[in-house]
Structures are given as C-alpha cells and as structure tokens.
Amino acid sequence: MSAEVVPFDWARLFLGDTPPLFLLEIVFRTTVIFGWLLLLLRFTGKRGMAQLSPLELAIVIGLGSATGDPMFYPEVPLLHAMLVMALVVGLQALMARLVIRSERVETFMEGVPVELVRDGVLSGRALEASNLSREDLFERLRAQGVRQLGEVQRAYFEQDGNLTVFTRAQDAPPGLPVVPPWDLEPPPVVQPSEPVRGPLACLGCGTTRDPDPSGQQDAGALRACACGSDRFTPATTDPLAPPSTASDTGLN
C-alpha cells in the first residue's frame, strides 16, 4: 500500500479528490459508454452472444467493470462506483422497457430470426449475414441429431444465437450428409466421368438432383448448381448406415 494512502479516510473512500460536480460527469460518461457498448455488441453478431442478448451482455460487462475496480484500487471512490452501477442498472431497465414497448427498438437491439435451411437446402446469403460458416451450422445440426440435410424442413438462427430446427417426422428424402464431420471424413466427390444413378447433393448448398435413373448419365453432364458449385456427392438418407441400396448412393 502506498505511504500516501490513509486507511479508512472516509472522504477519499466515497468522494476521492474530485469536486462533487464530477458526479454529474460520471453520469454523462456512463451513459455514453453504455450506449456505445450496446451499439458495438449489436454489430458483433448473434454468434458470440451465447444465449445472451446484447442488452444482457452489456449489463454484465458494465457491472463487472464498475464493481471490480473500487474493490482494490484506493484511488477509485466508492460513491463513484456505486453511481456507475446504479446508472448501468437504470439504463438496462430503461432499454428493456423500450424493447418491450417498441418493435423497432427490439429489432434494432436484438435483430430478427434468420432462416438458414429450407427443405434441405442451405441459404449461403443467410449464413454470411449471420456470420456463420457451413461447418458451424453442421456442428449445430449434429448436436440436435441431424444426420443429413434432407431431414431438415426449416432451421432458424434465433435472436439469442440459438438454432431452432424443424425436422421431418418420418420419410425424410435423401440429402447432403452432415455426419461424419467433414474435417474427419469429407464426403466423396462424384467425378465428371462417373456414371451416376440416384440422387446427388450439391456440396455447396445441399440441393439434390435426380439424374437419369438408368445410370447412363455421367456426372459431367450435370449443370452447375444455382449456388455456383459444380461439385456433387451422393445424397443419402442415413450417412452412418452402410450403403446397401441404390437409394443410399448416387454412384453406380
């Protein structure tokens, strides 16, 4: 402890060496920083929120900083920290009320759900807007027991950063496999010279195609997918089951 610090100096503990008018400046500083923090958190995206809204994350950060410094820095007056804490809680209550009363404020603060998958097909634009990679989405789908995209009717990236998935109750069509993880076992790519039969899935977005069932068509005759990818893999109803039937693979 510094020699200049007098223990239990009540004036220093609560007011420090600043004039009382400095309390008004603290109100201004806290309001500006809290608002700036909310704005920054709003634009960091939902992926990093981990089930916390920007407003909830802002109060956690704000209170954490306000309560930590006065605990062991003798130059930080308690009254200043207490005022900051009260302001952070008050601003949070005000913003929460505005979010409840105004749909525009709610949309700005928390965003809107984003549809990532529709009928087994990925939306590249939605993934990019959500700051998610295809591998991120597949990881979240696997966590919910999804094996291939054909099982997914809709997948929504919610406002709190969670993924909501609606799957087909039964008889899911073949689709792009999401298991095993592609980093461990990438799906086989159908070569242009290979004759194919059965459905193929685009490796870019998961769109399925049904080539000539006779098996006389080769993969080179397939046009590029609407997403721009020209790489396909056999669509499957269960990528973890051994390919025993023609419906499980697109190769002859």
Image (cartoon, rainbow, N blue to C red):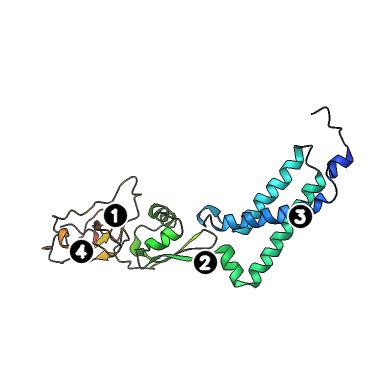
> Could you say whether the residue bearing mark 4 is in a helix, strand or loop?
loop
Which badge, 2 or 3, is on the more N-terminal residue?
A: 3
Q: Tell me if residue 166 can be seen.
A: no
Q: Nearest the camera: 121 or 33?
A: 33
Which badge, 3 or 4, is on the more N-terminal residue?
A: 3
Q: Circle 2 sits on which residue? A: 112
Which badge, 1 or 2, is on the more N-terminal residue?
A: 2
Q: Residue at x 66, y 51 (%)?
A: 60
Q: Nearest the camera: 23 or 200?
A: 23
Extreme residue in the top direction: 3
Mark nearer the viewer, 1 or 4: 4
Name the side, left or right, on which 56 lies relative to 209.
right
What's the distance in space between the residues labelled 1 and 4, CA to CA? 29 Å
Q: Residue at x 38, y 63 (%)?
A: 123
Which badge, 1 or 4, is on the more N-terminal residue?
A: 4
Instruction: Give the residue type that dot 1 points to.
Output: Ala
> Could you say whether the residue bearing mark 1 is in a helix, strand or loop?
loop
What is the number of the mark on residue 121?
none
Q: Residue at x 67, y 64 (%)?
A: 95
